[in-house]
Amino acid sequence: MQIEFGIPTRRTRTVKEEKYPNTPVVTMCQKPEQRGAYKFEFNQKALELMKFECTGEESVALGFNDSRIFIANVTDGTFDSGYRVAKQGTFSNSKVYEYMEANFELDTSSENVFRIEQAEDVDNAYELVLIDSTSDSAPDEGVDTDLLTEETVATTEVDSSSAVLDLD
């Protein structure tokens, strides 16, 4: 017989699968209701395309021209300003978020997903193209339309102050 001493703790962990695993995208997260981060998230393909290693020392810059949005890896000092990319592959900036919300008429009550494409007329930058997830039309070629799924996994862990005693 095996007895666990201590109070087991129940923890719920959410496993999140990427919405577009085969397409480089930046997700502009839902606007925080009160205080919070105005966050942008890169998926794994976007991190690879933009050559981010998620060291916490890398920077990204955004540029705007009429109705177009550009993004560039400026870790090498290409531009004087940029936004630090966190180790989780995210960056936050409320002014950029609010500018994009106002000037591109985005609904920030839910997330907005932008596909990253090579900008043909701009060197060293990519263009962000909004993916219309509410459209009934067929998605652009190369866009993976897998839905985001969240799986909740319940685990039981024994508190570190407890001990297990095998009585056999």
Image (tube, grey):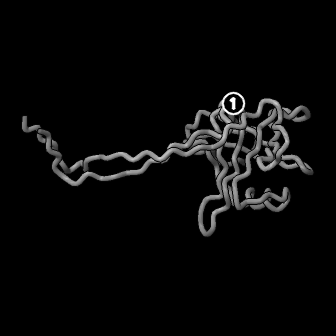
Q: Quadrant of the C terminus?
A: top left
**Residue 128 visible in this rendered orientation of the protein:** yes
Task: Give above or below for 101 relative to 68.
Answer: below
Return the x and y of residue 135 as percentages of the image width and height.
82, 47
Given the current orientation, which residue lies at the most extreme front position?
Answer: 136
The residue lying at 80 percent from left, 33 percent from top is 124
The residue lying at 58 percent from left, 39 percent from top is 17
Q: Quadrant of residue 55?
A: top right
Q: Quadrant of residue 20?
A: top right
Of 89 and 21, nearer the camera is 21
**Residue 51 visible in this rendered orientation of the protein:** no
Residue topped by disc 1: 22
Name which residue type carries label 1. Asn
Of 35 and 1, nearer the camera is 1
Q: Quadrant of the N terminus?
A: top left
Task: Give above or below for 47 relative to 40.
Answer: above
Of 113 and 138, nearer the camera is 138
Of 115 and 59, nearer the camera is 115
